[in-house]
Image (cartoon, rainbow, N blue to C red):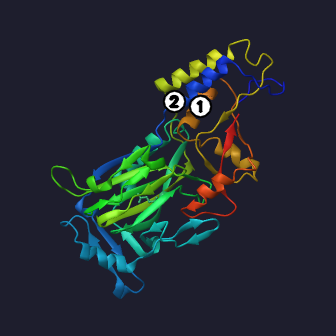
């Protein structure tokens, strides 16, 4: 972000800057959302095939509670689930123990587009960016976690630079364990699907879902009994012409006034200059192509988007820049695990200026 001047950037250290930093750090924009919704009988079946027509079958999630034996037949059509490590797709049961079906092998009657989930996810995760952007879901896999299945902490590494968030839809089956922990050790949320997939009073089957920014660390705890069946989706950004929201939230208003206080102080950047904000989230960018960042600046997440919106709304120019940290081996090691790791594109940690 810069004021409109041709002066070179000046680094300023002051109480005011520290106050602004504290303000930005105290902001809380949602970075995940969860919910449940009834599963209608008309959306209750899952069809699958193993290879030939004679190996095909279906499960119904709405005609009584599924027995483990029924699910076992589905498991037999599955392959062991892999994950990305470095540039490779690997099978490592000490890291991920689960089964998967590729999209070519199954078809679910459950229709995400008609379920209303995307509207909720859009409002929560694109809160400050929803003026111009929308999310497009791409069905990725069906996964089954049986007794002893788990997925250790990881981030979902992007296959596309448009990857914004991940969505997990849990189908109604009896199971215990298999909680999805969001944030380190579940610091953000403990999503216990086993308690959500049947209505607490009527016991009617329900869908439970969790959506979160793909760079948020998460894990699936071991399933203790039964089977946990999920549909996973990659949520991509797509251009849209949604109307600009009129109301700015209290959070945004308070950040705007903190920024205004700062820039109206004659002691701060008296000759103009630049303010830098380290981004809170990570983004799938290819830093080789500067032009990508122009587009990327419209797709910030949560608090990052909030800071950008606040700056723009008081007339400051905002740009996203990459800062290279050549010695950041720790992150390579930590984030070299996850869904579909790709070799030449990775989460970058740009700076907002
Ligand atoms: O099943 C879940 O809750 C999350 C699965 C997951 O992290 C993934 O497929 O990448
Ligand atoms: Fe994941």
Indicate which disc residue 220 carries.
Answer: none
* Residue 138 in sight in this render: no
Identify whether 341 is placed above or below 189.
below
- Secondary structure under the numbered disc 1 in the rendered image: helix
Residue placed under numbered mark 2 in the picture? 27
Q: Give the quadrant of ligand 1.
A: bottom left
Identify whether 326 is placed above or below 159.
above
Look at the numbered disc 2 and say if its residue's Cβ is closer than 8 Å to ligand 2.
Answer: no
Contact check, label 2 and label 1, Cβ < 8 Å: yes
Picture quarter with the N terminus: top right
How far is disc 2 from disc 1 in space, using C-alphas?
9 Å
Q: Can you tell which quarter of the image residue 145 is in?
A: bottom left
How packed is label 1: few (under 14 Cα within 10 Å), some, or many (20 or more)? many
Residue placed under numbered mark 1 in the picture? 307
Residue that appears at 49% across and 27% down: 246
Q: Can you tell which quarter of the image residue 276 is in?
A: top right
Look at the numbered disc 1 and say if its residue's Cβ is closer than 8 Å to ligand 2.
Answer: no
Q: Residue furthest toward the top?
A: 266
């Amino acid at each position: 972000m810069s004021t409109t001047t041709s002066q070179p950037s000046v680094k300023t250290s002051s109480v005011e800057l520290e106050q602004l930093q504290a303000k930005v750090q105290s902001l809380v924009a949602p970075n995940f959302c969860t919910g449940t919704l009834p599963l209608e009988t008309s959306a209750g079946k899952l069809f699958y095939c193993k290879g030939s027509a004679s190996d095909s079958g279906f499960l119904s999630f709405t005609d009584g509670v599924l027995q483990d034996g029924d699910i076992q037949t589905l498991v037999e059509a599955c392959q062991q689930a892999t994950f990305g490590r470095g540039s490779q797709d690997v099978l490592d049961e000490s890291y991920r123990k689960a089964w998967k079906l590729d999209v070519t092998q199954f078809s679910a009657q459950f229709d995400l587009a008609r379920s209303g989930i995307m509207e909720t996810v859009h409002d929560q995760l694109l809160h400050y960016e929803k003026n111009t952007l929308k999310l497009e879901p791409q069905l990725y896999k069906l996964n089954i976690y049986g007794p002893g299945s788990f997925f250790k902490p990881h981030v979902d590494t992007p296959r596309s630079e448009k990857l914004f968030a991940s969505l997990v839809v849990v189908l109604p089956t009896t199971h215990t364990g298999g909680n999805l922990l969001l944030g380190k050790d579940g610091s953000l949320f403990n999503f216990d699907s086993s308690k959500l997939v049947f209505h607490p009073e009527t016991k009617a089957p329900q869908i439970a879902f969790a959506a979160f920014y793909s760079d948020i660390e998460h894990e699936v705890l071991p399933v203790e009994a039964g089977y946990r069946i999920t549909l996973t989706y990659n949520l991509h950004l797509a251009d849209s012409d949604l109307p600009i929201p009129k109301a700015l939230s209290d959070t945004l208003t308070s950040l705007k006034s903190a920024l205004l206080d700062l820039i109206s102080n004659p002691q701060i950047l008296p000759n103009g200059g630049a303010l830098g904000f380290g981004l809170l989230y990570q983004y799938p960018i290819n830093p080789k192509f500067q032009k990508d960042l122009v587009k990327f600046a419209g797709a910030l997440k949560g608090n990052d988007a909030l800071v950008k919106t606040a700056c723009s709304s008081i007339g400051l120019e905002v740009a996203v820049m990459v800062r290279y940290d050549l010695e950041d081996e720790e992150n390579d090691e930590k984030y070299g695990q996850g869904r579909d790791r790709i070799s030449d594109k990775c989460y970058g940690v740009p700076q907002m200026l």
